[in-house]
Amino acid sequence: MGYSPGTAPEPLTDLIAEVSAELLHLREVRAEYIIFERLTCNPGNKSIDIDGVVFDVKPIVFSQIKKSERAALFICTAGPEVGEKSRRTMKEGDLLRGYVYDVIGSEAAENAADRMQEELRLAVAGEGLKITNRFSPGYCGWDVAEQHKLFSFFPDNFCGITLTESALMNPVKSVSGIIGIGRDVEYAPSQCNLCDDKNCIYRGRKAESRKPPIYW
Amino acid sequence: MDQLLEKLLTCVEFGKVDIKSPYPPAMKDQEGAFELTRHALDDGISPGEILEEALIPAMSRVGQKFSRNEIFVPQMLMAAKAMNSSMIHLRPYYLTGETKRRGTFIIGTVTGDLHDIGKNLVAMMIEGGGWEIIDLGVDVSTEKFIEAAEKHPGAVIGLSALLTTTMENMRKSVAELRQRFPGQKILVGGAPVTADFCRKIGADFYSPDPQGAVEYLKTLT
C-alpha cells in the first residue's frame, strides 16, 4: 500500500489484520505450471517458439529467456471470492475495506506464484538447472493480448481461470506467465532494473516508501 | 474562516468520521465530520459554504498530499469516508436544488475492462471537488456513455482503461462520443494511457492521478 514498516495508520493495520483473518479460510488459491521441452528462441524478432506457438515477448523478456533450454508456463489464482468481496464492499460504500480486500487478493495471487516458482526451482535443481524470474503478458513490454496464446496451452477453465476477449483473467486476482529453465539462465534479484516502464504497477513494489501508482 | 468550518476541514483531511472513530488518535473522543456538519448547519452556515470552505479544500489538500507521495490510498479513502459522513447532512439540499454542485461528472471503465479501483478513487476525489458523480461502473459500452451524456447535458465524461487491449475500446468510445457531441469534454486515464494517447484519440485531458483530474475540472467552472 506504500507505507514503510510501522508507518501505516492505526485503523488500517487493524483492518488488515481483520480482513486477513477473515480470508484465512480461502481454499480457492491455486497454482499450476507445465514444463515444455521444445523451446526455440529467435533473436531476430525477439520471439520465443513453444511447441509451434510463437510468443512475441519483446526485448526485455527475450533477453532473460533466451538462454533457456525449457520453459514453464504457469497460471495462479487467489480464486473468485476475494475479488468479489472487494467489488461488493466497494459498491456498498466501504471503499477502504474493499481496497484492503483487493490488495490482499493481489498478494494472495502473487504469493501463490512465489510458491509455485519455488517448487519449480526445486523440481529442476536436481538436474542442475536454474530458473529465470517469472514474466507475464502485459508487463516488461510483452503485449497482454498474448495471454490468449499462453492460455491455449491449458485446458479450458484450468485452475478455474477463464480469459475474456480483452485478455483479462477471471478471477481478476490471477497471475499467468512464463519462466525460463536452463543451465545458463539467471534469476535477477531486482527485476525492475530490467525494465524502463515507469507506469508498471509492480515497479518498486518491494522498495520502501514507494506507493503503488493509482490508475483509473 | 469560521472556526467550526476550520475544524470540519481538519476532520475531513485526516479522516475523522464521527465521535466514535478512534482515528486519528490525537482527535479521539472529539466530534468528527458528521457532528460538525450538523452543528454548522444548525448555526446557520449554508451547505454551499460548508462545501466550498471546508469539504472541497480538505479533499484538495488530500489530493495534493497524495500527488506528493506524502499519503497513500488508504488515507485518501479515510478522508472520503469522513467527507461522505458530512454529505449525509448536505445531500437533501442538493436534492431540493437549494445548493448547487460545480457540475456533473460521468465516469466509467470502458468495454471489456473490469478494473474499478482507480476509477472509484478518481470519482471519489472529483466528488470531493464538488461535482455530482454518475458512476456507470465497469465494462461500460459506448452506448451507455452516450445515453448518460444525453441524460446529463453539459456533464464532463471520464473514461478509464487498465489494459492495452481495452485502450482500443477507449479510442472507439471517444471517437463516437466526439461524433455525437462535438463539444463534449472528455477525460481519460488508466495504467497504459498516456498524454500522447489522449491527444491521438481526441480526448481533452489525461491525468496520471486523481488530483490532476480535479484541477482540470476546476478550469471548466
Image: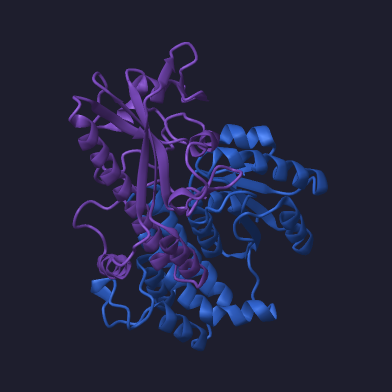
Chain colours: A purple, B blue
Residue B63 to residue B171: above or below: below
Residue drawn at 75 percent across, 57 percent down? B149
- Numbered disc total: 0
Relative image position of residue B102 (x, y in whole percent)? 63, 63
Quarter of the image with the N terminus of chain B in it: bottom left
Q: Foreground: B164 or A209?
A: B164
Relative image position of residue A2 (x, y in whole percent)? 31, 50
Name the quadrant containing residue B81. Answer: bottom left
Residue that lies at the very extreme toward the top in this rendered image: A44
Q: Foreground: B219 or A53?
A: A53
- Any part of residue B219 in sight: no
Name the quadrant containing residue B10. Answer: bottom left
Residue A111 to residue A101: above or below: above
Q: Foreground: A167 or B188?
A: A167
Relative image position of residue A115 (x, y in whole percent)? 26, 46
- Any part of residue A83 in sight: yes
